[in-house]
Amino acid sequence: GEDVEQSLFLSVREGDSSVINCTYTDSSSTYLYWYKQEPGAGLQLLTYIFSNMDMKQDQRLTVLLNKKDKHLSLRIADTQTGDSAIYFCAESEGGSGNTGKLIFGQGTTLQVKP
Amino acid sequence: DVKVTQSSRYLVKRTGEKVFLECVQDMDHENMFWYRQDPGLGLRLIYFSYDVKMKEKGDIPEGYSVSREKKERFSLILESASTNQTSMYLCASNSGGFTDTQYFGPGTRLTVL
């Protein structure tokens, strides 16, 4: 079945760039997503990318998609302590029609040190 | 402002109790989802519903059931709670289609003693 994999932990210093990586297996996924979960809260959508795009930039966030290698990354420029959170990669389930089902990765905990 | 609310933030129950987790969305969304979140495992889909009275099993439905009598409300039921159901439970909704993000509630942390 479909699977999404992420490393579990990343630590960076404030002001550095963070890169969170994700691999997925379903080549028919139409959209890929990045969600952020702050402590004690639900998930919030950060950004998403359509599968026919290679890159999407939104302020400090850059998403890169390598469809051949089924690899997705999220780069956060000038990382701040407020960026400390769990980041989830997700893919839309191929062939699911309009159910809007997503397959989530394990989540990467980003720790930003002052 | 979109909103998904869950009935409790924290819940403590005893083994064998029947547990109800309630989720309400105010966005007139067709689809609603229940996930559980465990460290290192990410989010796993328990059940989802794409219409009133309709439900489909997710990846880990065993030990759970759901109810959707009204469009805005989706309930998760643990018929007989067990300690391995101690987890964070997240509800989400969307209006369907790949471009529609899922909106999440704040989560219910359930502890079964």
Image (tube, grey):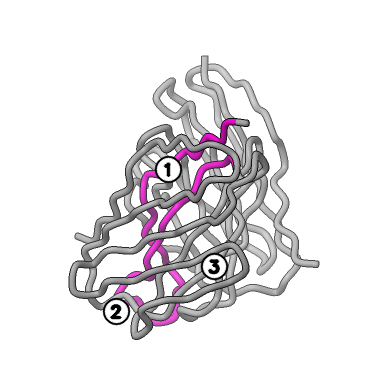
Q: CA distance from mark 2 to mark 3?
A: 22 Å
In the rendered view, would you say A58 is above or below A80? below
Q: Which residues are magenta?
A: A84-113
Q: Is residue A102 magenta?
A: yes
Residue B71 in the image: state x and y as whole percent. Answer: 66, 69
Q: Mark 2 falls within which chain?
A: A
Q: Is residue B15 magenta?
A: no
Q: Look at label 1 and name its amino acid.
A: Thr
**Which mark is in front, 2 or 1?**
1
Can you say which quadrant of the picture contains the N terminus of chain B?
Answer: bottom right
| Mark 3 or mark 1, earlier in chain | 3
**Which mark is in front, 2 or 3?**
3
| Mark 2 or mark 1, earlier in chain | 2
Question: What SS does tag 3 mark?
Answer: strand
The residue wearing badge 3 is A47
The residue wearing badge 2 is A95
Marks 3 & 1, CB-CB < 8 Å contact: no
In the rendered view, would you say B35 is above or below B3? above
